[in-house]
Amino acid sequence: MDHKVIVLNSHGVGQFCRIKRLPVLGESLRAWDWHIPNDGGKGSNVSVALGRLGINTAIVTKVGNDAWGDLGEKWMSDAGVDCSFLYRSDDVSTGTGLVMIDDEGNNTIIDGEGSGRFLTPEEVIGAIDGIAGATHLITGFEIPEKLAILGLKHAKEKGMITVLNPSPLPEEDYDDLSFVDYLFVNELEGRTLLHEDEDIDDETILRELHEHLGVKTTVMTLGKNGYCFLEDGHYVVKPGIKVDNVKTTAGAGDGFLAATMAQLIKGKSLDEACDWAQYYAALSITYPDTMPGYRYPEEVEAFKKKYLP
């Protein structure tokens, strides 16, 4: 089976807990409902979302021969993701993280060291070359930045469409991302890439990313305020969708990215794709954990009809 999308990023297992409110410096808070849900790193999150949306997807990452790695392989395989290049090793331990969720559904995420950092350049190149029919590469910085950049450049040389979510925020400065076709950021990430601390408006952020980094198309999520994007010099901004009964916003950004790319692959315009993806992400936050919120197309369509303005 030919693959449309390669996801090059991390898998880890998140541990969730509830807190009354997010902590401040030096504060100790009580937590409850501490549990291990269906929640992965950005690589497994995006892969599962794409798989459930009917997109042929392959994951490229490295995990340990441990229970956390077994869980990731099961979650992704169950979603129809090809795990042929899910490298398993006795020499690494699959990463874990902690997600703290307050009474309003806001979250703070602490990422542990991920096993994806043990990927080698040879494994990355070998996987991209070994996956037949791939047209898109999606990556991010939960693996070492140099490996994500290597993957993007190699995929671009092969004529693939390249997608970058620079999260967690990069440690290195970049002055050229012209090999990136689609950059997905939130407002903080956009400003950080530009070294802008001042309160510049969203359109300026997107135009400066294009001018200074050579990014072709940038999509910026605005949380509950919606999203905006810059494509071929054309700026578009759309308001958010107010939903009831928010359980957690963790993973909403990964879901938005996956849903946008799924719609683009199916032939939609970027405007149409982002609009649909916003409903997808809004539906996802009504579920208590991350992967259970990545729903199937027919459920998203029903949700969209309910919330159409």
Image (cartoon, rainbow, N blue to C red):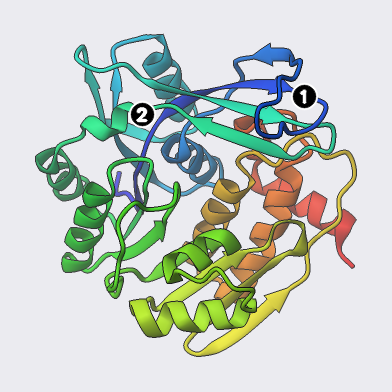
Residue 266 visible, this angle:
no
Whichever of labels 2 and 1 marks the residue nearer the N terminus, that label is: 1
Residue 23 can be seen in this image: yes
Outermost residue, front side: 26
Q: Nearer the viewer, residue 11 or 308?
A: 11
Mark nearest the camera among 2 and 1 is 1
**Amino acid carrying mark 1 in the image:** Ile
296 left or right of 3 in image: right
Instruction: Tell me the SS state at disc 1.
Output: loop
Residue marked by disc 1: 19
Q: Is residue 53 left or right of residue 278?
A: left
SS assignment at label 2: loop
- Residue under the point 49% across and 41% down: 51
Question: Residue at (51%, 71%) from the top-left corner?
Answer: 196
Q: Amino acid at mark 2?
A: Gly
Residue drawn where x is 68% and y is 13% of the image: 34
Residue on which the image places disc 2: 114
- Give the answer, above or below, for where 110 lies relative to 127: above
